Every structure is written in C-alpha cells, then in structure tokens.
Amino acid sequence: MPTREILQKLNAQVNREFNASHLYLRLSDWCTEHNLNGAATFLRNQAQNNVTYMMSLFDYMKQEGADPVIGAAPVSACECGSLEELFLRTLDDLNQRSASLSRLMLLAKACHDETTCSVLDSLSASHAQDRQFLQALLEEVRAASREGVPVADTDQCFFNLVNYEHH
C-alpha cells in the first residue's frame, strides 16, 4: 500500500491532470472564438485524454483505500496571440505535470512501492507520447508560419488530424 505521503502526492497529480483538462477546454474555447475549429476540436480531445489520466489515478487511489479530493479548477483567462503561443502553453503545462510525476515516481521507487511505480510509469509513457505529439504540432505551426501558410489552412490540418485519429 502506498504511504500517506505518496497518496497525498498522487492526489495532487490527480488535480494537476484535472486542471490540465480545464486548461485545454479554455484553450479550445479561445480557438473557437478565433474560428480555429480544427485546433479547438483537437484541444477538446486532448482535454478528454487528461480526464482519462486523472480517472486512472483516481481509480488507483480508490483501489488502495484512499479518498481522492478534487479541488476546484482555477479559472483564468486563456488569451493567446497565436497558435504557436497556444502550443507553447500546452507544452509548458505538460512539462510541469511530467516533472511532478517524475518526482512522485522517484518517491515511490525509494519506498519500494512497485504497484504505484507501475501506475505512474504508464502515465509517464502517455505524457511522453503527448509531449512528442505536441512538439511535432508546434514545429508544424512554426513551419507553416515561416512559409506564410494562412492560419485557416493550418487549422484545417488540425481538423484533418482529428478526423484521421477517429477513423
């Protein structure tokens, strides 16, 4: 069974994943307001992924007899000046969540908590895939900007990407 300290840090990670889903939804709303519907749909899908991550940690904590506490998601403005800024923001958030996850994994390893390590390792792998994907999208946005591709065309690529992922 995880130690009390590990359970507290797991609960904090649950809330980080929950807050990330809210961030992605707010960024999706910003995209919708700027007629970037492809990016908005992509971000809503990412928000759902974060809810899935949160639920896996939540379920693990319940399985271990803990009572996770979900705090209110902070509400802040999500103004971005560009798609590049938006993706930089998502990467920064993911990097912060991944860093806290890495610290938690080190603690679980130090406590010889193999079950928690396994759960965290799975989430860490998902974060790594998300990071690689978001970084690739950021590079595509930057390349399109350098080449003078209209933002609407770049957004259409996001729409195509979302449709491709669902088929």
Image (cartoon, rainbow, N blue to C red):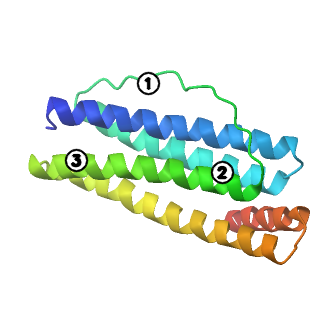
In the rendered view, tell whether residue 126 sits above or below residue 69. below
Q: Which residue is mark 1?
A: 70
- Mark carried by residue 45: 2
* Quarter the C terminus occupies: bottom right
Q: 10 Å neighbourhood of mark 1: few (<14), some, or many (≥20)?
A: some
| Element type at mark 1 | loop
| First in sequence: mark 1 vs mark 3 | 1
Instruction: From the top left corner, tell me how far across and down residue 80 is, in percent.
Output: 74, 45
Extreme-bottom residue of the structure? 147
Q: CA distance from mark 1 to mark 2?
A: 21 Å
Q: 10 Å neighbourhood of mark 3: few (<14), some, or many (≥20)?
A: many
Residue 161 is left or right of residue 23, and the answer is: right
Instruction: From the top left corner, tell me how far across and down residue 109 is, in percent.
Output: 14, 53
| Element type at mark 3 | helix
Q: CA distance from mark 1 to mark 3?
A: 20 Å
- Mark carried by residue 116: 3
**Residue at horizontal 68 percent and vertical 50 percent from the top:** 43
| First in sequence: mark 1 vs mark 2 | 2
Q: Quadrant of residue 8?
A: top left
Q: For the residue marked with disc 2, what is the amino acid?
A: Asn
